[in-house]
Amino acid sequence: MHARQLLNAGIATAVLLGLQVVLAPSPTLASNMWSQQALLLVHLPQPGGQVFTTNYMITATEAPVTVNIKCFNDASQRIGPIAGVNVPLSATGQVAFHTPTSLLVTTDPLFTGVGWCWANNIISDEEYNVQTVVGLTGSLIPNGILTSASSTFVAANSGLAETSSEHGGLPYFTTGAGVQNFLVLVNPLTVGRTLTIQLYDTNGVPQGAALLRTVGARGMQVLQVPGGFGLPTPPASGSVTIIADGNGYLGWIVQVLGSNRLLFTAVGLDEDDLTLLPPASAP
């Protein structure tokens, strides 16, 4: 299923039930505050004039930086300005606020409503940080999700930096009480990657054969857990591990819990196998 359809069916349906504000913690193994970061991109219009969208808070953490942001849709196509959008930060601690609208992707005819962006420090290797906030809002101004009274649902996560080929994944999922689980995976490299994704029950017993998913160059895939594994009787809870055929994947975990909570966290990566993308390979 198309990434937009899958996320729209799971997340936006839950949003329309009238959700409360929830902030999800960032996992310890997801690297952030670096010179390269991947950002989740969502902008899905909903009934009543509201939009399920993303806001970005970009902060210089060490020194002045200029962050260039290039975006892609879920079919690996570049969207927005070819050169990207530059975000200048002239002092340590300075914050810039952006939205899909200000990143100039929402008017691109190739934008499907779902995708990802690559943020890169184009001047030096000075670090910066990005907080991505996801929510339902009627305000499209920068930081509107957090500042507008019309916003009814929020989840937050840090931008992803570096890539891994070893054992990342979803540490725990459950389908109890109607919980929906999604793995959103991106490949920031110029060559495709095959991911070996294994489903386990809570006792660590593999459930069926490993699922092989190819994520194309600059590609994005969404996998529903456990339904996407195609098992006739999948476990109600368990975990997922991911191995890539070489360095090159990042991702987020989106879990819709009933009608009033959403957790948005990063896929944990193997701390012994994190690799900064070389300049020639970075988007």
Image (cartoon, rainbow, N blue to C red):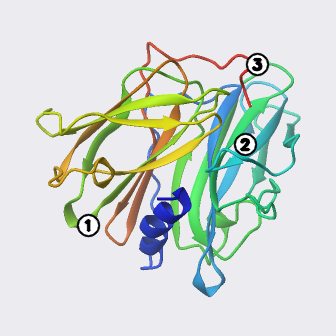
For label 3, the residue is 279
3 or 2: mark nearer the eye: 3
Q: Earlier in the sequence, mark 3 or mark 2?
A: 2
| Quarter location, residue 243 | top left
* Tag 2: amino acid: Ile
Q: Earlier in the sequence, mark 1 or mark 3?
A: 1
On the question of residue 224 being in view, the answer is yes
In the displayed structure, 197 sits above or below 260; it is above
Q: Nearer the viewer, residue 182 or 158?
A: 182
Secondary structure, mark 3, is loop
For label 2, the residue is 58
- Residue 153 in the figure: left or right of residue 188: left
* Tag 3: amino acid: Pro
3D distance between C-alphas at marks 3 and 2: 21 Å
For label 1, the residue is 178
Query: What's the mark number on residue 52?
Result: none
Secondary structure, mark 2, is strand
Secondary structure, mark 1, is helix
> Which residue appears at 17% of the width and 34% of the height?
206
> Which residue appears at 46% of the width and 65% of the height?
11
